[in-house]
Amino acid sequence: DGGITQSPKYLFRKEGQNVTLSCEQNLNHDAMYWYRQDPGQGLRLIYYSQIVNDFQKGDIAEGYSVSREKKESFPLTVTSAQKNPTAFYLCASSISPQGGEKLFFGSGTQLSVL
Amino acid sequence: SQQGEEDPQALSIQEGENATMNCSYKTSINNLQWYRQNSGRGLVHLILIRSNEREKHSGRLRVTLDTSKKSSSLLITASRAADTASYFCATDLNDKIIFGKGTRLHILP
């Protein structure tokens, strides 16, 4: 089955700790995205990547970092600099790097602070 | 950057009735998309309408786009309990896809 896999489903972070959220896709899509969703809110763009070894900041990139070493993988690291990390994190991909294409989403990772 | 804004924020209707939700946006777009999200899950793409289209249908869904008013509407006909979800519009902005805050739809039995 083709799709996007996010792991883990639930993640807990201690104060001062960096944590990494995994996102893998086997759709052969060029573009990948990370969004953050707070309760009852819409999605806010953290980072996006249109091609391997390249990525751009979204609207709320501070306190986060990403890498795109392989086409199928786009991990997100939530650093200790992100003071309010509790949220639902969604990874998505699209076939083309041109904006406005249909997005395919993973099932999300809920991150909480201990 | 908030590009799309859905209205209403929440909507409750009886099963079998039609549900209409609206989306307004600020800048010119190439296309507009609608997505559905069930609680605690990822988003699912429903329909994409391009800027040169005025109306599009998919099953019980009808989407309209008025570029002069910078607005779109999503109509779900003959609603079912399974339609209970949040619905988001998304627009393209400089190669990014920006989402609104969504409409929470609740179908009453």
Image (cartoon, rainbow, N blue to C red):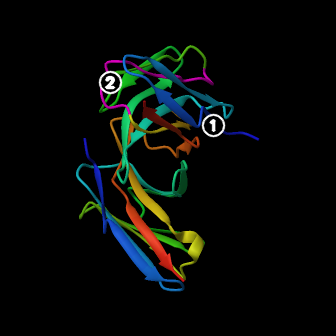
What subunit carries mark 2?
Answer: A
The quadrant of the picture occupied by the C terminus of chain A is top left
The quadrant of the picture occupied by the N terminus of chain A is top right
Residue A81 x, y percent position in the rendering: 31, 19
Q: Could you classify mark 1 by the number of other residues whose Cα lies within 10 Å: few (under 14), some (14-19), or many (20 or more)?
A: many
Read off the residue under disc 1.
A4
Q: Could you classify mark 2 by the number of other residues whose Cα lies within 10 Å: few (under 14), some (14-19), or many (20 or more)?
A: some
- On screen, A7 above or below B105? above
At horizontal 51% and vertical 56% (from top left) the residue drawn is B39
Q: Earlier in the sequence, mark 1 or mark 2?
A: 1
- On screen, B26 above or below B72? above
Q: Amino acid at mark 2?
A: Gln
Q: Nearer the viewer, residue A105 or A9?
A: A9
At horizontal 49% and vertical 30% (from top left) the residue drawn is A12
Q: Are marks 1 and 2 on the same chain?
A: yes
What subunit carries mark 1?
Answer: A
Q: Are marks 1 and 2 in contact (CB under 8 Å)?
A: no
The answer to whether one can see residue B76 in this image is: no
Q: Nearer the viewer, residue B3 or A21?
A: A21
The answer to whether one can see residue B44 in this image is: yes
Q: Nearer the viewer, residue B94 or B12?
A: B12
Read off the residue under disc 2.
A82
At horizontal 30% and vertical 31% (from top left) the residue drawn is A60
Query: Magenta residues?
Result: A71-85
Asked which secondary structure carries label 2, the reply is loop
